[in-house]
Amino acid sequence: MDFSGKRVVVTGAGKGIGRATALMLARRGAHVVALTRSAADLETLSAETGAQAIVVDLADAEATRAAARAALPADFLVNCAGATELESFLDVSVENFDLLHAVNTRAPMIVAQEYARDMVGSGRTGAIVNVSSCASFVGIPDHAAYCASKAGLDGLTRVMAKELGPHGIRVNGLHPTVTLTPMAVKAWSDPDKAAGMLARIPLGRFAEPDDIAEVILFLLSDAAAMVHGLSMPVDGGYMIA
Ligand code: NDP
């Protein structure tokens, strides 16, 4: 897959899956525009790849819209930034519920809205990948706000696919299982919990960030020209009933 000459906006490109995606895109010729929170991550990414760096807190709606506009024009968009807080349902706080919805659901909406308005206005075609999670399909203990925020993102993906498809903008959701990133360290460091999750993955391992990045690039590329509105697990078989 060759992305030469393509500009790709990647949110959450500082760490984990977003960073792996940005690095892979850059290796395959793309110019990456990276939106994320920690300036130090963006400095090293820019030094490595020449990526354009935009520091933003995606929990802030106005700042997110301004950052999205500054990132344009672009050919493709990867909404990858995400956050989690571990709380049992009985303990979920309104603050964390709102925070996870702001970062995991509202920010992808705002960034995609700005991207799509620009594409539709200029008559160009493109593709969006919204990075969701298996947690949008499965109730995972201590992940109530996270599961709800990702299920909300899936609803958004489906409507975006219906409305943006006629404009030549493909929209797909991608659903990783546990992927070995800083987020996984936060959510799955407990060996008992990790073992229970691993036992449900027929391929017998957690994902590496590059496993997910490869599929993101596929969904952006012309190889996926008829793939639209999909909720695609990348999970080693975790979702098999
Ligand atoms: P990481 O925590 O490793 O990286 C997340 C990236 O998003 C970081 O660069 C982080 O920046 C950025 N980010 C988080 N919150 C904000 C914010 N408020 N404003 C701006 N940037 C922010 O996560 P992963 O790479 O693991 O996750 C990537 C995506 O994949 C997420 O949407 C996640 O929900 C999803 N996912 C991950 C799984 C996993 O097991 N890892 C499983 C299923 C889905 P900073 O570090 O500066 O906060």
Image (tube, grey):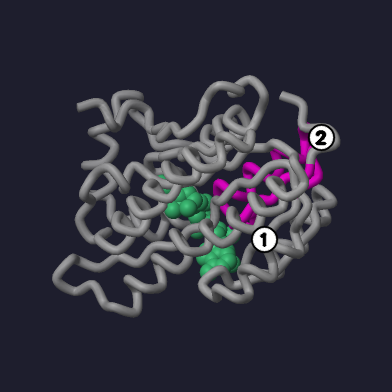
Question: What is the span of residues highlighted in magenta in the rendered image?
Answer: 7-32
The residue that mark 1 highlights is 35
- Name which residue lies at 69% across and 67% down: 67
Q: Can residue 15 be found in the magenta stretch?
A: yes
Disc number at residue 182? none
Residue 190 seen: yes
Q: Amino acid at mark 2?
A: Gly
Residue 62 position in % (x across, y down): 60, 76
Q: Can residue 30 be found in the magenta stretch?
A: yes
Residue 152 versus residue 190: which sits nearer the camera?
Answer: 152
- Name which residue lies at 37% across and 28% down: 236
Residue 212 versus residue 199: which sits nearer the camera?
Answer: 212
Q: Decide: is 5 above or below 180.
A: above
The residue that mark 2 highlights is 29
- Name which residue lies at 77% across and 26% down: 2
Q: Decide: is 210 above or below 18.
A: above
- Name which residue lies at 30% across and 65% down: 86
Query: Residue 233 sits in which quadrant?
Result: top left
Locate residue 202 relative to residue 69 in the image: left or right: left
Ligand 1 within 8 Å of the CB at mark 1:
yes
Q: Amino acid at mark 1?
A: Leu
Residue 234 seen: no
Going from N to C along the chain, the mark reached first, 2 or 1, is 2
